[in-house]
Image (spheres, rainbow, N blue to C red):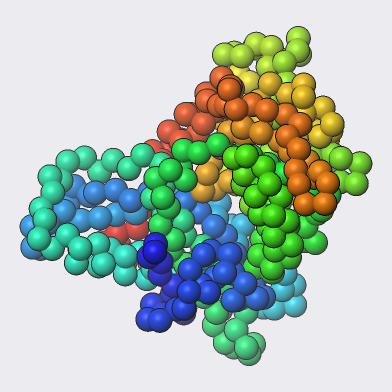
Amino acid sequence: MMEFTVVRDGEVVSEPGQDLASPAGFLRSIGSGAYTAAGVSRRRSRRRRDDGLSRMEFWLPLWDEHVYRLGHSLTRLFPDSDQVKDGDVVREAARASVSALLRHEMNQEGSREATTNHDVGAAEPEEGFTHMVTVALRPGPGPSSPLACFAHLYPLRPESRATTASVLLSEFRRISPEAKSCAWATDRRPLEVDLARRGAMLAGGLSEVVMCTERGMLLEGTKSNVFVVVEDDRGGGGLNPKRRLLTPPLSSGILPGLARAAVIATAAALGIAVEERQVDSKDCTGWSECFLTSAVKMAQPVAAVAVPAGGSGAEVVADFAGRAPGPVTEAIRGALWDRVLRGEGGRLFGPPGW
């Protein structure tokens, strides 16, 4: 069983219960609130502890963007609450919750390594993300009450950072795509049940639902945004002169994902043309590549696109398994990981300065 940690209002929950083991279960337990989820990279610091052992630190990329989105979601979900309008209060609440969470993990790590010394070396991040942190906030019960703060730390399996995705197209959309609401973990539950049922009937299974309009236009995944690559003479030059990235526009009613924005910026830096426009799912056989983006997976290659078939089955309509990741996905993924793991805009959590 994988270990996880839950913090409520700065205090570690000693017996959180297995219903909170997953990030989704954690969000469903909160009910009303805004949240953000991020990948965390654990790294070994150059600084030693007092007992001579090396310290652990945690790098949380895009921290400023996560805090801004958390505040934006709060004002959207609770427009009449004065508690959520102070950006500094939101920032401090998020920082304190994550600090308490990671401080506990660092203490646990120190206990596990008490008999083992490690070479300190350079404070470089481990490959990919080692943990997923979810932070949720909501107004307190009274006008003068502080924000209620919740945080959840979930370890990622090594294979979860390197796998491809197989997606199921489904007609559905978020109720409030402009905000990351804890209620979405409950709203998307029917999609997840359907995904598991249909995936069980398909060799290789299914891992994510990509929602579409009633006309079959792509929207987003339940926990991701979606990009496709097409080849024609309208490419933008650079490394891939005939390839363009297409992604649904924000105006179609999708979440403005942080990884989505990072991919668009990264593609521009690589000279890859990007168009934000409607993407018809019926054209999937003409896509040369497809990938999903999220703040935990960054850019995850899609190996197969399926549609519902029969009572509870699924049929693969586009198969990228032999060529995923493609050259565009690979170029963007490499540049993106380098940017978020070693670039600016993140926050290092660790002593001193928790």
Residue 194, horizontal then vertical, whole percent: 73, 56
Question: What count of labels does the image hold?
Answer: 0
Residue sitting at x 58%, y 64%: 24
Residue sitting at x 46%, y 38%: 162
Residue sitting at x 31%, y 69%: 104
- Determine the residue located farthest toward the right in the rendered image: 215
Residue 163, horizontal then vertical, whole percent: 50, 38
Q: Is residue 52 above or below residue 161?
A: below
Residue sitting at x 77%, y 24%: 285
Residue 56, horizontal then vertical, whole percent: 25, 55
Q: Is residue 207 above or below residue 106?
A: above
Pick the residue in front: 42 or 85: 42
Q: Quadrant of the N terminus?
A: bottom left
* 305 left or right of 213 in image: left
Q: Quadrant of residue 247?
A: top right
Q: Quadrant of the C terminus?
A: bottom left
Residue 118, horizontal then vertical, whole percent: 13, 49
Q: Is residue 77 above or below residue 170?
A: below
Residue 296 visible in image: yes
Pick the residue in front: 83 or 10: 10
Q: Quadrant of residue 276?
A: top right
Q: Is residue 316 above or below residue 241?
A: below
Residue 92 visible in image: no
